Image (cartoon, rainbow, N blue to C red):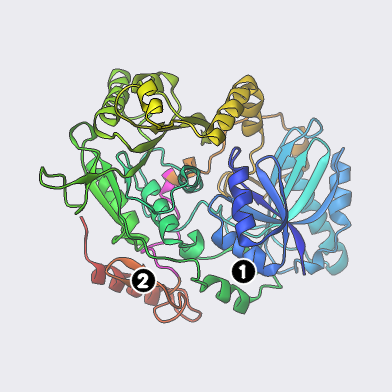
Amino acid sequence: MTTSLIAKTFQGLEPLLAQELTELGADDIQIGRRMVTFKGDKEMLYRANFCLRTAIRVLKPIKTFKAKSADDVYAAVSAIDWSEYLTPETTFAVDSVVFSPEFHHSKFVAYKVKDAIADQFRERTGKRPNVSVSNPDIQLHIHISDYDATLALDSSGESLHRRGYRQETVAAPLNEVLAAAIIMMTGWRGETDFLDPFCGSGTLCVEAALIARGIAPGVFRKSYAFEKWPDFDRDLFERVYNDDSQERDFDHHIYGRDNDPKAVGIARRNVRAAGLSKEITIDEADFRDTPLAIPSSGDGVTDQEVATAPLIVTNPPYGERISSPDLLGLYKTIGQKLKREFSGGEAWILSYREECFDEIGLKPSLKTPLFNGSLECELRKYVLFQGRLDEHRASGGFVKTDDERRQMAEKRRFKQHRDGFKSGHRDERDDRDEHDAHRFNKFSRRDEGFKPRRSFGDRDGDDDRRGGDRRVKGGDRRGASFKGGSFKSGDRRGKGDFHAKGNDRAARQEARRRFFRGEGNEE
């Protein structure tokens, strides 16, 4: 049966998400503000969670209504027959996102939803389901914009940016969804080598490998919220999970570099946990002293070898770990090395300081506004060539395509309306994961008098400083087969499944230990 669904994302990524849904075969796709609505059956719901790289969660609306007061919220929620979704023994939690002149605190809205559900069960059965913030059986999500309210089931649970391969992080890590989106914006799908000279914890490298290999990002996940729904179809999800028809060979290589030994160690562990050691090489190297070109053998640049230009996609330091004079000097070096060593290549750089981009000293072909957490950033594309720009054009070369000219015009319009874009991003907080979203546990009715709190930016990326997906140790893929540190196709929940029904914790831990002993230590 086809139903309406909502995929949430970061602002600016909606077209990419819509394109992904089109490729999945979703129907009636409509782009909204930080979301894309679509229609699909249960299989589409499962595939959306499992396959989408640019979604942060997938919602299944239960009811839409007008909410001009707290009583409207209570009445609308009370009108739903909650026995279809819950029992007195079921635990639940409520996320709320509110952008309305009527409601000053989203926790109060979550409280009204919880109150209506609990009262209904108490009146009918004399019992009420309990709230569980950390691991609920059913996750609900209410969104109010002005007076329009949507109550939905959250089918994802943990934010989908938490792929499951990340073992550790460096400070201010790049969100996995944003990293995948940046790579998709470049149009790269594995046709050349790939280089991130400021790789940090390796997120861009891992996401690039997943894209190049056609591996679904959900292959590492332990679970989804829909697996606890009463109508969960395990056999259907097993078919979705084990469908490797989109996976392919990757004939090139991905290189990550960083001058921080700790970051290099973390990146290598994350790569190994993802089973992508054959596709990715992480090296300790200072950008200033290391050639950008990659040799044909991949073993280091020598005078005898012919160097080739990879695609460069990188997120250099913004200033958190480096002093301001050195920071500007670093960006000046980036521009000099690109111009001197990377003729004929293409580089995409994400940063947020205009003065840093100025130091690069190169004319970008494309500027795309993006938010990295709460930072208002730009992704700039640089096409490198020898000589002067007019000479390059006279010889038939180009810097901007017609589509890029159109996008640059849209970028100028973005600058004109930047304040509205930024405030909208900060006020709507529905893309944070469950650690930061407003959940109800023990509230009293005095919450109705809460004062509005200051708005703040999205935290999906910030939360990764807590250590990434804590539930994933060892990077297993629900029984995926690994050989030589590389992912192999086959039954991903078959033999060796760390999470198969009946396996206890000790057995899973021993399986992980065997996995790591077999692969060895890259460090």
Estimate how packed mark 1 is, as few (under 14), some (14 to 19) or many (20 or more) residues with alpha carbons within 10 Å. some
Q: Position of residue 233 (x, y in %)?
A: 65, 75
Callout 1 amino acid: Glu
Instruction: Check the image and report above or below for 230 versus 217.
Output: below
272 or 98: which is nearer to us? 272
Callout 2 amino acid: Gln
Instruction: Check the image and report above or below for 193 versus 426.
Output: below
475 or 277: which is nearer to us? 277
Which residue occupies 28% across, 21% down? 329
329 or 195: which is nearer to us? 195
Q: Is residue 468 magenta?
A: yes
Give the mark, 2 or 1, whose residue is nearer the N terminus: 1
The quadrant where residue 173 appears: top left
Q: Is residue 204 magenta?
A: no
The quadrant where residue 503 appears: bottom left
Residue 474 horizontal side relative to residue 126, left or right: left
Which span of residues is magenta-colored?
465-477
Q: Which mark is residue 227?
A: 1
Q: Which residue is mark 2?
A: 509
Which residue occupies 71% across, 42% down? 32
Residue 24 horizontal side relative to residue 523, left or right: right
CA distance for labels 2 and 1: 23 Å
Q: Is residue 374 visible?
A: no
